[in-house]
Amino acid sequence: MSIKANFAKSGMWMVTGAIFNNLSSMVIFVALARLLTPVQFGIVAFATIFIDFSRVLVVAGIPDALIQRKDWDDDVASSAFWSNIGISAGICLIIVLVAAPLSYLGYDETFALVLVSLSMALLIEALTTVHTAKLRREFRYKTIASRNMAANVLGGVIGITLAWIGWGVWALVVSRLLSAALTSIILWRTSGWQPRFHFRWHEVRSLSAVSSHLLGNQLIGQANSQLPGLVIGSIMGPAALAQFRVGTRILNLMSQLLITPLQAAAMSAFSRLDDDNKPIAPAYVRVTRSCSLLACPIFFGMAAVAPDFTRIMFGPQWHDAGIIMMINSLVVGPSVIMYFFVPALAAAGASGLSLRFYLATLVATAAAAIGSIPFGAIAVSAAKVIESHLTLPYGLSLTRRAIGLRPIDNLRAIAPAYLAGLAMAIIVGAFGYFALQQFQPWLRMPIIVVVGGLIYPALLAVFARRFLKETLGELSFLKHRFGRRAGQEG
Protein backbone atom coordinates (compact mmCIF):
# COMPACT_ATOMS: atom_id res chain seq x y z
CA MET A 1 0.00 0.00 0.00
CA SER A 2 1.33 3.47 -0.92
CA ILE A 3 2.25 6.08 1.67
CA LYS A 4 -0.66 8.25 0.52
CA ALA A 5 -3.11 5.37 0.89
CA ASN A 6 -1.69 4.44 4.30
CA PHE A 7 -2.04 8.02 5.42
CA ALA A 8 -5.61 8.18 4.13
CA LYS A 9 -6.60 4.95 5.86
CA SER A 10 -4.86 5.91 9.10
CA GLY A 11 -6.27 9.40 9.09
CA MET A 12 -9.82 8.19 8.50
CA TRP A 13 -9.64 5.62 11.30
CA MET A 14 -8.26 8.20 13.68
CA VAL A 15 -10.93 10.68 12.60
CA THR A 16 -13.59 8.04 13.19
CA GLY A 17 -12.25 7.32 16.65
CA ALA A 18 -11.84 11.00 17.39
CA ILE A 19 -15.40 11.77 16.33
CA PHE A 20 -16.78 9.10 18.63
CA ASN A 21 -14.47 9.96 21.53
CA ASN A 22 -15.05 13.68 21.27
CA LEU A 23 -18.81 13.37 21.00
CA SER A 24 -18.91 11.02 23.97
CA SER A 25 -16.40 13.20 25.85
CA MET A 26 -18.57 16.21 25.13
CA VAL A 27 -21.61 14.51 26.66
CA ILE A 28 -19.57 13.39 29.66
CA PHE A 29 -17.98 16.81 30.11
CA VAL A 30 -21.32 18.62 29.99
CA ALA A 31 -22.88 16.20 32.48
CA LEU A 32 -19.98 16.58 34.90
CA ALA A 33 -19.97 20.38 34.55
CA ARG A 34 -23.60 20.43 35.61
CA LEU A 35 -23.06 18.00 38.49
CA LEU A 36 -19.88 19.55 39.91
CA THR A 37 -19.03 23.06 41.07
CA PRO A 38 -16.41 25.29 39.39
CA VAL A 39 -14.14 24.85 42.44
CA GLN A 40 -14.30 21.05 42.19
CA PHE A 41 -13.61 21.23 38.47
CA GLY A 42 -10.75 23.65 39.06
CA ILE A 43 -8.97 21.44 41.61
CA VAL A 44 -8.79 18.51 39.19
CA ALA A 45 -7.89 20.80 36.29
CA PHE A 46 -4.99 22.28 38.27
CA ALA A 47 -3.67 18.82 39.17
CA THR A 48 -4.03 17.73 35.54
CA ILE A 49 -1.66 20.50 34.45
CA PHE A 50 1.17 18.88 36.42
CA ILE A 51 0.21 15.36 35.32
CA ASP A 52 0.08 16.29 31.63
CA PHE A 53 3.48 17.93 31.86
CA SER A 54 4.89 14.87 33.63
CA ARG A 55 3.38 12.61 30.98
CA VAL A 56 5.64 14.21 28.37
CA LEU A 57 8.67 13.27 30.49
CA VAL A 58 7.40 9.69 30.81
CA VAL A 59 7.10 9.29 27.07
CA ALA A 60 10.36 11.23 26.57
CA GLY A 61 9.94 11.35 22.78
CA ILE A 62 10.84 7.65 22.56
CA PRO A 63 7.68 6.40 20.76
CA ASP A 64 8.16 8.90 17.92
CA ALA A 65 11.83 7.90 17.72
CA LEU A 66 10.77 4.24 17.41
CA ILE A 67 8.31 5.14 14.67
CA GLN A 68 11.02 6.88 12.65
CA ARG A 69 13.45 3.94 12.80
CA LYS A 70 13.78 2.18 9.47
CA ASP A 71 13.39 -1.27 11.04
CA TRP A 72 11.69 -2.44 14.23
CA ASP A 73 14.06 -4.02 16.76
CA ASP A 74 12.54 -5.90 19.72
CA ASP A 75 15.66 -5.38 21.84
CA VAL A 76 15.64 -1.63 21.31
CA ALA A 77 11.89 -1.54 21.96
CA SER A 78 12.36 -3.46 25.21
CA SER A 79 15.05 -1.04 26.36
CA ALA A 80 12.68 1.82 25.55
CA PHE A 81 9.89 0.12 27.52
CA TRP A 82 11.94 -0.29 30.70
CA SER A 83 13.28 3.22 30.33
CA ASN A 84 9.72 4.59 30.29
CA ILE A 85 8.80 2.51 33.34
CA GLY A 86 11.81 3.81 35.28
CA ILE A 87 11.13 7.43 34.35
CA SER A 88 7.45 7.19 35.33
CA ALA A 89 8.28 5.58 38.69
CA GLY A 90 10.81 8.32 39.44
CA ILE A 91 8.34 11.09 38.61
CA CYS A 92 5.65 9.48 40.77
CA LEU A 93 8.05 9.39 43.71
CA ILE A 94 8.86 13.08 43.28
CA ILE A 95 5.17 13.93 43.20
CA VAL A 96 4.36 11.81 46.25
CA LEU A 97 7.37 12.79 48.37
CA VAL A 98 7.92 16.42 47.34
CA ALA A 99 5.14 18.07 45.32
CA ALA A 100 2.17 16.71 47.26
CA PRO A 101 3.46 17.65 50.77
CA LEU A 102 4.29 21.16 49.60
CA SER A 103 0.84 21.50 48.04
CA TYR A 104 -0.79 20.18 51.21
CA LEU A 105 0.93 22.82 53.31
CA GLY A 106 0.84 25.79 50.96
CA TYR A 107 -2.10 25.44 48.59
CA ASP A 108 -4.99 23.04 49.23
CA GLU A 109 -5.33 19.70 51.03
CA THR A 110 -7.74 18.20 48.51
CA PHE A 111 -5.51 19.28 45.63
CA ALA A 112 -2.54 17.43 47.15
CA LEU A 113 -4.52 14.18 47.45
CA VAL A 114 -5.87 14.52 43.92
CA LEU A 115 -2.35 15.13 42.57
CA VAL A 116 -1.03 11.95 44.22
CA SER A 117 -3.95 9.89 42.93
CA LEU A 118 -3.68 11.12 39.34
CA SER A 119 0.07 10.47 39.32
CA MET A 120 -0.75 6.76 39.23
CA ALA A 121 -1.96 7.29 35.67
CA LEU A 122 1.67 7.95 34.66
CA LEU A 123 2.68 4.43 35.66
CA ILE A 124 -0.35 2.94 33.92
CA GLU A 125 0.27 4.78 30.65
CA ALA A 126 4.01 4.01 30.69
CA LEU A 127 3.11 0.34 30.28
CA THR A 128 1.86 0.84 26.71
CA THR A 129 3.78 3.75 25.18
CA VAL A 130 5.95 1.36 23.16
CA HIS A 131 2.94 -0.78 22.22
CA THR A 132 1.18 2.29 20.86
CA ALA A 133 4.31 3.29 18.92
CA LYS A 134 4.37 -0.12 17.24
CA LEU A 135 0.73 0.17 16.24
CA ARG A 136 1.29 3.67 14.87
CA ARG A 137 4.38 2.55 12.98
CA GLU A 138 2.32 -0.18 11.30
CA PHE A 139 -0.54 2.24 10.57
CA ARG A 140 -2.85 0.15 12.77
CA TYR A 141 -4.91 3.13 13.82
CA LYS A 142 -8.10 1.09 13.69
CA THR A 143 -6.88 -0.87 16.72
CA ILE A 144 -5.90 2.28 18.61
CA ALA A 145 -9.16 4.05 17.83
CA SER A 146 -11.50 1.19 18.76
CA ARG A 147 -9.75 0.53 22.08
CA ASN A 148 -9.78 4.20 23.04
CA MET A 149 -13.49 4.41 22.28
CA ALA A 150 -14.34 1.55 24.63
CA ALA A 151 -12.21 2.93 27.47
CA ASN A 152 -13.55 6.46 27.03
CA VAL A 153 -17.20 5.40 27.28
CA LEU A 154 -16.73 3.14 30.29
CA GLY A 155 -14.67 5.70 32.20
CA GLY A 156 -17.16 8.44 31.42
CA VAL A 157 -20.18 6.44 32.54
CA ILE A 158 -18.51 5.62 35.84
CA GLY A 159 -17.44 9.26 36.32
CA ILE A 160 -20.99 10.56 35.80
CA THR A 161 -22.40 7.91 38.11
CA LEU A 162 -19.96 8.79 40.88
CA ALA A 163 -20.60 12.52 40.44
CA TRP A 164 -24.36 11.88 40.62
CA ILE A 165 -24.06 10.12 43.96
CA GLY A 166 -21.89 12.88 45.41
CA TRP A 167 -18.25 11.85 45.01
CA GLY A 168 -17.25 15.36 43.87
CA VAL A 169 -13.67 15.67 42.63
CA TRP A 170 -13.12 11.95 43.10
CA ALA A 171 -15.60 11.19 40.36
CA LEU A 172 -13.18 12.82 37.90
CA VAL A 173 -10.13 11.13 39.41
CA VAL A 174 -11.56 7.61 39.35
CA SER A 175 -12.89 8.10 35.83
CA ARG A 176 -9.46 9.10 34.47
CA LEU A 177 -7.60 6.31 36.21
CA LEU A 178 -10.06 3.71 35.04
CA SER A 179 -9.94 4.90 31.41
CA ALA A 180 -6.13 4.81 31.44
CA ALA A 181 -6.07 1.32 32.95
CA LEU A 182 -8.58 -0.13 30.51
CA THR A 183 -6.80 1.35 27.50
CA SER A 184 -3.45 -0.03 28.66
CA ILE A 185 -4.84 -3.53 29.23
CA ILE A 186 -6.45 -3.71 25.81
CA LEU A 187 -3.44 -2.30 23.93
CA TRP A 188 -1.10 -4.69 25.73
CA ARG A 189 -3.16 -7.64 24.54
CA THR A 190 -3.70 -6.50 20.96
CA SER A 191 -0.41 -4.91 19.87
CA GLY A 192 1.28 -8.23 19.18
CA TRP A 193 4.40 -7.21 21.09
CA GLN A 194 5.62 -8.09 24.57
CA PRO A 195 8.69 -6.57 26.27
CA ARG A 196 11.69 -8.75 27.03
CA PHE A 197 13.79 -8.64 30.19
CA HIS A 198 16.38 -6.71 28.24
CA PHE A 199 17.86 -3.25 28.80
CA ARG A 200 20.92 -1.61 27.27
CA TRP A 201 21.87 2.02 27.77
CA HIS A 202 23.42 2.27 24.32
CA GLU A 203 20.09 1.30 22.75
CA VAL A 204 18.29 4.02 24.67
CA ARG A 205 21.00 6.48 23.64
CA SER A 206 20.49 5.47 20.00
CA LEU A 207 16.92 6.68 20.33
CA SER A 208 17.87 9.83 22.20
CA ALA A 209 19.47 11.39 19.11
CA VAL A 210 15.94 11.80 17.74
CA SER A 211 13.93 11.74 20.95
CA SER A 212 15.90 14.49 22.71
CA HIS A 213 14.77 17.11 20.21
CA LEU A 214 11.24 15.69 20.19
CA LEU A 215 11.18 15.66 23.99
CA GLY A 216 12.32 19.27 24.09
CA ASN A 217 9.63 20.25 21.60
CA GLN A 218 6.95 18.37 23.53
CA LEU A 219 8.00 19.80 26.89
CA ILE A 220 8.02 23.35 25.61
CA GLY A 221 4.82 22.80 23.64
CA GLN A 222 3.15 21.47 26.78
CA ALA A 223 4.47 24.41 28.79
CA ASN A 224 3.11 26.80 26.17
CA SER A 225 -0.36 25.29 26.35
CA GLN A 226 -0.44 24.87 30.13
CA LEU A 227 1.31 28.05 31.28
CA PRO A 228 -1.78 30.33 31.14
CA GLY A 229 -3.77 27.83 33.20
CA LEU A 230 -0.88 27.38 35.63
CA VAL A 231 -0.68 31.13 36.21
CA ILE A 232 -4.45 31.44 36.64
CA GLY A 233 -4.70 28.46 39.00
CA SER A 234 -1.75 29.58 41.11
CA ILE A 235 -2.79 33.22 41.50
CA MET A 236 -6.58 33.34 41.02
CA GLY A 237 -7.51 29.91 42.39
CA PRO A 238 -9.46 26.82 41.20
CA ALA A 239 -12.74 28.60 40.37
CA ALA A 240 -11.10 31.00 37.89
CA LEU A 241 -9.10 28.14 36.40
CA ALA A 242 -12.32 26.17 35.93
CA GLN A 243 -13.84 29.01 33.90
CA PHE A 244 -10.69 29.14 31.79
CA ARG A 245 -10.65 25.37 31.31
CA VAL A 246 -14.28 25.14 30.29
CA GLY A 247 -13.74 28.03 27.86
CA THR A 248 -10.80 26.28 26.23
CA ARG A 249 -12.02 22.69 26.60
CA ILE A 250 -14.55 22.79 23.77
CA LEU A 251 -11.99 24.24 21.37
CA ASN A 252 -9.48 21.60 22.42
CA LEU A 253 -12.09 18.94 21.70
CA MET A 254 -12.57 20.45 18.26
CA SER A 255 -8.83 20.33 17.65
CA GLN A 256 -8.69 16.72 18.78
CA LEU A 257 -11.59 15.94 16.48
CA LEU A 258 -10.26 17.67 13.38
CA ILE A 259 -6.49 17.91 13.69
CA THR A 260 -4.91 15.52 16.18
CA PRO A 261 -5.81 12.35 14.21
CA LEU A 262 -4.23 13.71 11.04
CA GLN A 263 -1.31 15.10 13.04
CA ALA A 264 -0.52 11.66 14.43
CA ALA A 265 -0.78 10.03 11.02
CA ALA A 266 1.30 12.84 9.48
CA MET A 267 4.27 11.88 11.69
CA SER A 268 4.32 8.44 10.06
CA ALA A 269 3.55 9.68 6.54
CA PHE A 270 6.06 12.56 6.50
CA SER A 271 8.77 10.19 7.78
CA ARG A 272 8.11 7.75 4.93
CA LEU A 273 8.17 10.57 2.38
CA ASP A 274 11.61 11.59 3.61
CA ASP A 275 12.81 7.98 3.44
CA ASP A 276 11.68 7.84 -0.19
CA ASN A 277 13.39 11.16 -0.97
CA LYS A 278 10.07 12.81 -1.78
CA PRO A 279 9.52 16.49 -0.93
CA ILE A 280 7.59 17.17 2.26
CA ALA A 281 6.48 20.72 1.43
CA PRO A 282 3.70 19.81 -1.06
CA ALA A 283 2.24 17.29 1.38
CA TYR A 284 2.41 19.89 4.15
CA VAL A 285 0.46 22.37 2.03
CA ARG A 286 -2.22 19.81 1.08
CA VAL A 287 -2.82 18.66 4.64
CA THR A 288 -2.88 22.23 5.98
CA ARG A 289 -5.29 23.32 3.25
CA SER A 290 -7.64 20.41 3.95
CA CYS A 291 -7.62 21.16 7.67
CA SER A 292 -8.30 24.85 7.10
CA LEU A 293 -11.44 24.05 5.10
CA LEU A 294 -12.96 22.42 8.20
CA ALA A 295 -11.25 24.19 11.09
CA CYS A 296 -11.75 27.82 10.06
CA PRO A 297 -15.57 27.81 9.85
CA ILE A 298 -15.89 25.75 13.03
CA PHE A 299 -13.59 27.94 15.13
CA PHE A 300 -14.92 31.22 13.79
CA GLY A 301 -18.45 29.86 14.14
CA MET A 302 -17.73 29.00 17.77
CA ALA A 303 -16.65 32.59 18.31
CA ALA A 304 -20.04 33.76 17.06
CA VAL A 305 -22.10 31.46 19.31
CA ALA A 306 -19.79 30.94 22.32
CA PRO A 307 -21.78 32.88 24.97
CA ASP A 308 -25.04 31.19 23.99
CA PHE A 309 -23.33 27.81 23.70
CA THR A 310 -21.85 27.81 27.20
CA ARG A 311 -25.09 29.06 28.76
CA ILE A 312 -27.11 26.30 27.08
CA MET A 313 -24.64 23.49 27.65
CA PHE A 314 -23.16 24.29 31.06
CA GLY A 315 -25.50 26.76 32.73
CA PRO A 316 -25.33 30.45 33.71
CA GLN A 317 -22.55 29.84 36.28
CA TRP A 318 -20.12 29.41 33.36
CA HIS A 319 -20.65 32.89 31.86
CA ASP A 320 -16.95 33.84 31.79
CA ALA A 321 -16.15 30.57 30.04
CA GLY A 322 -18.26 31.72 27.08
CA ILE A 323 -16.25 34.91 26.65
CA ILE A 324 -13.00 32.97 26.98
CA MET A 325 -14.18 30.52 24.32
CA MET A 326 -15.06 33.37 21.96
CA ILE A 327 -11.62 34.95 22.34
CA ASN A 328 -9.67 31.70 22.03
CA SER A 329 -11.49 30.82 18.81
CA LEU A 330 -9.60 33.62 17.08
CA VAL A 331 -6.34 31.67 17.29
CA VAL A 332 -7.44 29.41 14.41
CA GLY A 333 -5.20 31.00 11.76
CA PRO A 334 -1.81 30.49 13.44
CA SER A 335 -2.96 27.16 14.86
CA VAL A 336 -3.93 25.63 11.50
CA ILE A 337 -0.67 26.74 9.90
CA MET A 338 1.47 25.32 12.71
CA TYR A 339 -0.46 22.10 13.43
CA PHE A 340 1.88 20.00 11.25
CA PHE A 341 5.01 21.99 12.01
CA VAL A 342 6.57 19.44 14.39
CA PRO A 343 5.84 16.28 12.31
CA ALA A 344 7.20 17.92 9.16
CA LEU A 345 10.40 19.18 10.77
CA ALA A 346 10.95 15.88 12.57
CA ALA A 347 10.63 13.99 9.29
CA ALA A 348 13.11 16.40 7.68
CA GLY A 349 15.61 15.85 10.51
CA ALA A 350 15.24 19.44 11.69
CA SER A 351 13.64 18.97 15.11
CA GLY A 352 16.15 21.43 16.54
CA LEU A 353 14.47 24.23 14.60
CA SER A 354 11.06 23.45 16.04
CA LEU A 355 12.69 23.49 19.48
CA ARG A 356 13.87 27.03 18.80
CA PHE A 357 10.36 28.08 17.84
CA TYR A 358 8.77 26.64 20.96
CA LEU A 359 11.42 28.24 23.14
CA ALA A 360 10.61 31.61 21.63
CA THR A 361 6.87 31.11 22.04
CA LEU A 362 7.35 29.90 25.62
CA VAL A 363 9.05 33.17 26.53
CA ALA A 364 6.31 35.12 24.76
CA THR A 365 3.55 33.07 26.43
CA ALA A 366 5.07 33.58 29.88
CA ALA A 367 5.32 37.33 29.33
CA ALA A 368 1.75 37.50 28.03
CA ALA A 369 0.29 35.43 30.89
CA ILE A 370 2.16 37.22 33.68
CA GLY A 371 1.49 40.65 32.21
CA SER A 372 -2.23 40.07 31.77
CA ILE A 373 -3.06 38.10 34.95
CA PRO A 374 -3.88 41.26 37.00
CA PHE A 375 -6.80 41.83 34.61
CA GLY A 376 -8.28 38.33 34.98
CA ALA A 377 -8.64 35.06 33.08
CA ILE A 378 -10.35 36.73 30.10
CA ALA A 379 -7.37 39.04 29.63
CA VAL A 380 -4.99 36.06 29.79
CA SER A 381 -6.91 34.44 26.93
CA ALA A 382 -6.73 37.60 24.83
CA ALA A 383 -2.99 37.95 25.46
CA LYS A 384 -2.42 34.34 24.33
CA VAL A 385 -4.25 34.95 21.05
CA ILE A 386 -2.19 38.08 20.35
CA GLU A 387 1.03 36.22 21.18
CA SER A 388 0.22 33.40 18.73
CA HIS A 389 -0.12 35.89 15.87
CA LEU A 390 3.05 37.76 16.78
CA THR A 391 5.19 34.61 16.85
CA LEU A 392 3.76 33.11 13.62
CA PRO A 393 6.27 34.83 11.26
CA TYR A 394 9.16 33.19 13.10
CA GLY A 395 7.54 29.77 12.72
CA LEU A 396 6.99 30.36 9.01
CA SER A 397 10.65 31.28 8.52
CA LEU A 398 11.78 28.09 10.22
CA THR A 399 9.40 26.01 8.09
CA ARG A 400 10.99 27.47 4.98
CA ARG A 401 14.46 26.70 6.27
CA ALA A 402 13.60 23.09 7.10
CA ILE A 403 11.46 21.91 4.18
CA GLY A 404 11.73 24.75 1.65
CA LEU A 405 8.12 25.93 2.02
CA ARG A 406 7.81 29.66 1.39
CA PRO A 407 5.77 31.58 3.97
CA ILE A 408 3.54 33.02 1.24
CA ASP A 409 2.64 29.49 0.05
CA ASN A 410 1.82 28.52 3.62
CA LEU A 411 -0.45 31.52 4.03
CA ARG A 412 -2.10 31.05 0.65
CA ALA A 413 -2.97 27.48 1.62
CA ILE A 414 -5.39 28.65 4.31
CA ALA A 415 -6.30 32.16 3.12
CA PRO A 416 -9.57 31.32 1.30
CA ALA A 417 -10.96 29.25 4.20
CA TYR A 418 -9.73 31.76 6.78
CA LEU A 419 -11.22 34.82 5.07
CA ALA A 420 -14.50 33.05 4.29
CA GLY A 421 -14.77 31.80 7.88
CA LEU A 422 -14.00 35.25 9.29
CA ALA A 423 -16.54 36.94 7.01
CA MET A 424 -19.14 34.34 7.94
CA ALA A 425 -18.56 34.93 11.68
CA ILE A 426 -18.89 38.72 11.27
CA ILE A 427 -22.10 38.36 9.28
CA VAL A 428 -23.82 35.89 11.60
CA GLY A 429 -22.56 37.74 14.67
CA ALA A 430 -24.13 40.97 13.46
CA PHE A 431 -27.28 39.09 12.46
CA GLY A 432 -27.59 37.56 15.91
CA TYR A 433 -26.96 40.84 17.69
CA PHE A 434 -29.28 43.06 15.65
CA ALA A 435 -31.99 40.71 14.42
CA LEU A 436 -32.14 37.98 17.08
CA GLN A 437 -31.30 39.86 20.25
CA GLN A 438 -34.75 39.25 21.76
CA PHE A 439 -34.58 35.48 21.12
CA GLN A 440 -33.71 33.01 23.87
CA PRO A 441 -30.22 31.44 23.55
CA TRP A 442 -31.63 27.96 22.85
CA LEU A 443 -33.43 29.35 19.78
CA ARG A 444 -30.92 32.00 18.67
CA MET A 445 -27.90 29.66 18.49
CA PRO A 446 -29.31 27.05 16.07
CA ILE A 447 -30.55 29.81 13.77
CA ILE A 448 -27.07 31.33 13.68
CA VAL A 449 -25.50 27.91 13.04
CA VAL A 450 -27.82 27.23 10.11
CA VAL A 451 -27.25 30.66 8.58
CA GLY A 452 -23.49 30.33 8.99
CA GLY A 453 -23.58 26.85 7.47
CA LEU A 454 -25.12 28.36 4.34
CA ILE A 455 -22.97 31.46 4.13
CA TYR A 456 -19.53 29.81 4.42
CA PRO A 457 -19.76 27.42 1.43
CA ALA A 458 -21.51 30.14 -0.58
CA LEU A 459 -18.60 32.52 -0.02
CA LEU A 460 -16.10 29.86 -1.08
CA ALA A 461 -18.16 28.90 -4.13
CA VAL A 462 -18.29 32.52 -5.28
CA PHE A 463 -14.84 33.83 -4.35
CA ALA A 464 -12.61 30.72 -4.04
CA ARG A 465 -14.01 28.11 -6.39
CA ARG A 466 -10.63 26.68 -7.35
CA PHE A 467 -9.57 26.29 -3.71
CA LEU A 468 -12.86 24.58 -2.89
CA LYS A 469 -12.60 22.17 -5.81
CA GLU A 470 -9.00 21.17 -5.10
CA THR A 471 -9.52 20.74 -1.37
CA LEU A 472 -12.71 18.73 -1.76
CA GLY A 473 -10.80 16.55 -4.21
CA GLU A 474 -8.23 15.80 -1.52
CA LEU A 475 -10.94 15.00 1.02
CA SER A 476 -12.78 12.83 -1.51
CA PHE A 477 -9.64 10.81 -2.05
CA LEU A 478 -9.38 10.16 1.69
CA LYS A 479 -13.02 9.08 1.85
CA HIS A 480 -12.67 6.85 -1.20
CA ARG A 481 -9.55 5.11 0.06
CA PHE A 482 -11.01 4.60 3.50
CA GLY A 483 -14.27 3.18 2.19
CA ARG A 484 -12.56 0.79 -0.21
CA ARG A 485 -10.04 -0.51 2.30
CA ALA A 486 -12.69 -0.85 5.01
CA GLY A 487 -14.71 -2.97 2.61
CA GLN A 488 -11.71 -5.19 1.91
CA GLU A 489 -11.04 -5.64 5.62
CA GLY A 490 -14.67 -6.43 6.32
Image (cartoon, rainbow, N blue to C red):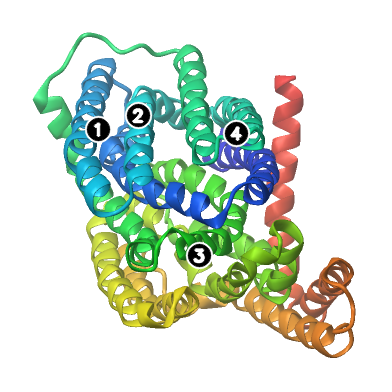
Real-space Cα separation, disc 2 to disc 3, in angstroms: 26 Å
Q: Mark 4 points at which residue?
A: 159
Q: What residue type is labelled 4?
A: Gly
| Quadrant assignment, res 137 | top left
Q: What residue type is labelled 1?
A: Cys
Who's the residue at 50% across and 30% down the image?
Answer: 174
* The N terminus: image quadrant: top right
Q: Which label belongs to residue 244?
A: 3
Q: Name the residue under label 2.
A: 120
**Which mark is in front, 2 or 4?**
4
Above or below for 477 versus 324: above
Circle 4: element type: helix
Q: How crowded is mark 4: few (under 14 residues within 10 Å), some or many (20 or more)?
A: many
Who's the residue at 70% across and 29% down the image?
Answer: 485
Circle 1: element type: helix
* The C terminus: image quadrant: top right
Is residue 301 at least partly visible in the picture?
no
Q: Which of marks 4 and 1 is nearer the N terminus?
A: 1
Q: Which label belongs to residue 92?
A: 1
Q: Which of marks 2 and 3 is nearer the N terminus?
A: 2
Q: Which of marks 2 and 1 is nearer the N terminus?
A: 1
**Is there CB contact under 8 Å for labels 2 and 1?**
yes
Q: Which of marks 4 and 3 is nearer the N terminus?
A: 4
Residue lying farthest to the top in this orientation: 197
Real-space Cα separation, disc 4 to disc 3, in angstroms: 21 Å
| Quadrant assignment, res 281 | bottom left
The one nearer the camera, 95 or 482, is 95
The one nearer the camera, 236 or 227, is 236
The one nearer the camera, 149 or 372, is 372
Q: Earlier in the sequence, mark 3 or mark 1?
A: 1
